[in-house]
Image (spheres, rainbow, N blue to C red):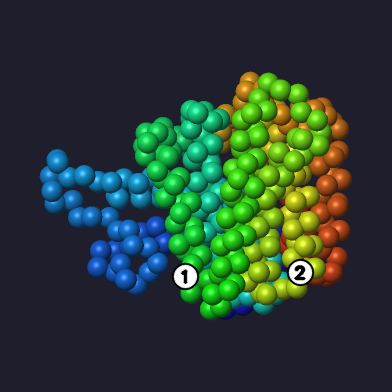
Amino acid sequence: MVIKLPDNLQEAIKKVADSLSERMEQLLYVPAGQEKTTVISLSPKVKTMGANHVRGEETVLEAMRYSALSGGKRLRPFLTLCSAGLFGVSWDSAIETAASIEFIHTYSLIHDDLPAMDNDDLRRGKPSCHKAFGEAAAILAGDGLLTYAFQVLASHKVHADPAVRCELIGALAQASGCWGMVGGQMMDMEAQDKTLSMEEIIRLQRLKTGELFAVSCEAGAILGKAPGMMRNLLRAYAHDMGLAFQITDDLLDVEGTRTQLGKTARKDKIAGKATLVAAMGVTRAREHAKILIKQAISHLDVFDKKADNLRALAEFVIARKG
């Protein structure tokens, strides 16, 4: 099935989110006896061993499901579906790839909330994974989602060409590892209560947030075997949009409420985090986000009307309230 999204942005986001949730639920649960029909080799064991039964697989899978299926904006999967639609990629191929990316994003949120990192008790309006299952289970649930993401990407359901699957695995590993998201998270931790230059803050944000946005957008182009120029344009769009997204997040942290955000407000200031809002002030940061969105949209000119959902998403990113 070829990717066809509604013209209305909110309807398009909902369609992707609903389809993604359905597929992730399938990937994170296997009825007993059907282990060989899907990628996953985990399946909950029948509880027949009484009080002494060890529930390791069940517990970690339950924690993985709790966090991965708890809603959220699903913007990264939406980027993947939109970019894949530019190159005639099938819906099933794109949604499988999008699920892998969302698993990695969810793992990062689980670990972000841990006491050793951001120490947040609330995520998406619910108790954080470590509050619901304990710290050890939360760490392992994050580990499980991270590694499972690559297992899913290795499946033929993603693409018939193994070279494409290998390229996706390499790109996602780089974007989420020490040269991307993890490196940015470490910079974020080390920058607390320190004064960073604007260039250092931008680099931190590009690694921490921007690289996963960029690979989400580029993934559709990789699936469609698009030429390098088009991949680079999509990465440039995602980097600018991702930085504007992070600025908006930081503005919401300053101006929003716990109810709006579904997580603790004003924690960046309390933790002494290095943000562009702290460096530039609220007014300048908001104006800078608008400039970044205009710049992001300009990278899409070559795609004409086919990229209208990506343009609308960019505008939505800085207008959102939560």
Question: Identity of the amino acid at label 1?
Answer: Ser
For residue 91, side relative to residue 291 (left or right): left
- Quadrant in the picture for residue 206: top right
* Along the viewing direction, whichever of 155 and 3 lies nearer the viewer: 155
* Along the viewing direction, whichever of 62 and 52 lies nearer the viewer: 52
> Residue at point 69% right, 66% down?
83
Separation of residues labelled 1 and 2 (CA atoms):
24 Å
> Residue at point 54% right, 36% down?
112
Res 26 label: none
- Quadrant in the picture for residue 45: bottom left
> Residue at point 63% right, 52% down?
175
* Along the viewing direction, whichever of 260 and 297 lies nearer the viewer: 297
Q: In the displayed structure, would residue 127 be above or below residue 308?
A: above
Tags 1 and 2 touching, CB below 8 Å? no
Q: In the displayed structure, would residue 245 be above or below residue 234?
A: above
| Among the two numbered marks 1 and 2 on one chain, the one whose residue lies closer to the N terminus | 1
> Residue at point 66% right, 25% down?
192
Question: Identity of the amino acid at label 2?
Answer: Gly
Q: Is residue 187 in view?
A: yes
Label 2: few (<14), some or many (≥20) within 10 Å?
A: few
Q: Is residue 22 in view?
A: no
Res 228 label: 2
Under circle 1, the secondary element is loop
For residue 234, side relative to residue 67 (left or right): right
Q: In the displayed structure, would residue 289 be above or below residue 45?
A: above
The residue identified by callout 1 is 155
**Where does residue 57 sit, x and y in percent of width and height?**
30, 50
Question: In the picture, which quadrant includes the C terminus?
Answer: top right
Under circle 2, the secondary element is helix
Question: In the picture, which quadrant includes the N terminus?
Answer: bottom right
**Where does residue 267 sit, x and y in percent of width and height?**
62, 26
